[in-house]
Amino acid sequence: MVAGEASGDLLAGLLLGGLTQRWPALSASGIGGPKMAAQGFEAWWPSDKLAVRGYAEVIRHYPELLGIRNRLAKRLLQEPPDAFIGVDAPDFNLDLEVRLKASGIRTIHFIGPSIWAWRGERIDKIKRAVDHVLCIFPFEPALYAQHGVAATYVGHPLADAIPIEVPRQASRRTLNLNAGDTVVALLPGSRRSEIQYIAPTLLEAAALMKCRRPDLRFVLPVAPGLRALIEPLLSRHAPGVCVELLDGQSHLALAACDVTLIASGTATLEAALFKRPMVIAYKMHWLSAQIMKRMNYQPWVGLPNILLQDFAVPEFLQSAATPEHLADAAFAWLDDPAACAALATRFEALHHTLRCDTAQTATHAIEKILAR
């Protein structure tokens, strides 16, 4: 298995739970993180090695990433596994899967590349790379079938892991927050480049919000290894503002908060599953942003908006992602309980759609592939 960054590690760890239940003697190894390790996974390289986003950023790390992929391919070709599962990270995994599939190794891709959102030309490589795609959104298998790619809808593992009824008060007690506190969760992302580009704006928005309403409470979940990067940004961009840094615990923060300022990505879907109003922000290197903008097929970037086919929550990208815009949009949610309740109703319906016992459903699909 290969999973990149924190979100891939989380999803792969949930999948491994189902696989090890079906095959207790399962041996799984490759590239992964702590969630996978907790399921017995042997990481030859840590998942954060692949936590690079954007074209300009990848160029700097390309030699190292290419070296890792070549060494991994050589090892897998010398000692072929029964199956290879690439978890997201399509830019790394698809080229690897092409080589493995050509040598006769069964290749499975978990979380189909979003050809419906951008870079649709990748379908040709996907056809050469994978034997089967495990899709997390219900409309995807039919789309892949149109291009001759076998696919199964397995639901989204986060929809299984996150309860329908949000344990809000219990989460607040765990985080030492009072029931009556107004809590803002800041989620700037789990990659170093995201922290560098997005965290300053979110922290400055928090400082503005604190000036307008001094009784606000702020929590910021920090991905493993990134606290040393966050702390100096906090003192620089939100001096005097008490922002409680949490070691991980993003689910507790989302369950407990009243609104979240959040970087676009998997975390926005987690926020939707916790039925939380959110303000989505994203910043990246200007060149990467221009390239990605030209490839995008959708008017939205946030997963909740894409799935609902609507600007259900506000999005602020690049130069539009200013502290003032984020603060104003957050207060718009806090000052409109009826809008928050209506959004929660839509998110609950989405939650039920995505809940499908992903680990078991995916395991059944993988079992059929292995039996061929």
Image (cartoon, rainbow, N blue to C red):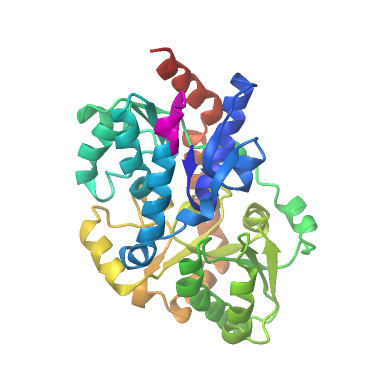
**Residue 296 is covered by the magenta coloring:** no
Name the residue located 49 percent from the left edge and 74 percent from the top edge: 196
Q: Nearer the viewer, residue 125 or 360?
A: 125
Drawn side of residue 73 relative to residue 170, left or right: left
Horizontal side, residue 104 vs residue 33: left or right: left
The C terminus, quarter of image:
top left
How many numbered callouts?
A: 0
| Residue extending farthest front | 78
Q: Is residue 275 visible?
A: yes
Q: From what the image shows, is residue 284 above or below residue 344?
A: below
* Residue 202 screen position, x and y as percent: 52, 74
Give the farthest residue toward the top: 371
Q: Is residue 198 above or below residue 99?
A: below
How far across and how far down the image is residue 170, in percent?
Answer: 77, 51
Determine which quarter of the picture holds residue 226: bottom right
| Quarter of the figure with residue 149 | top left
Front residue of 131 and 185: 131
Q: Is residue 307 visible?
A: no
Residue found 22% across the figure and 26% down from its top:
148
x, y percent for residue 45: 53, 48
Percent position (x, y) of residue 267? 51, 54
Quadrant position of residue 179: bottom right
Against 372, residue 279 (above or below) is: below
Residue under the point 60% across and 60% down: 223
- The answer to whether residue 138 is above or below residue 47 is above
Q: What residue span does the magenta drawing correspond to?
A: 75-84
In reply to whether residue 77 is colored magenta, the answer given is yes
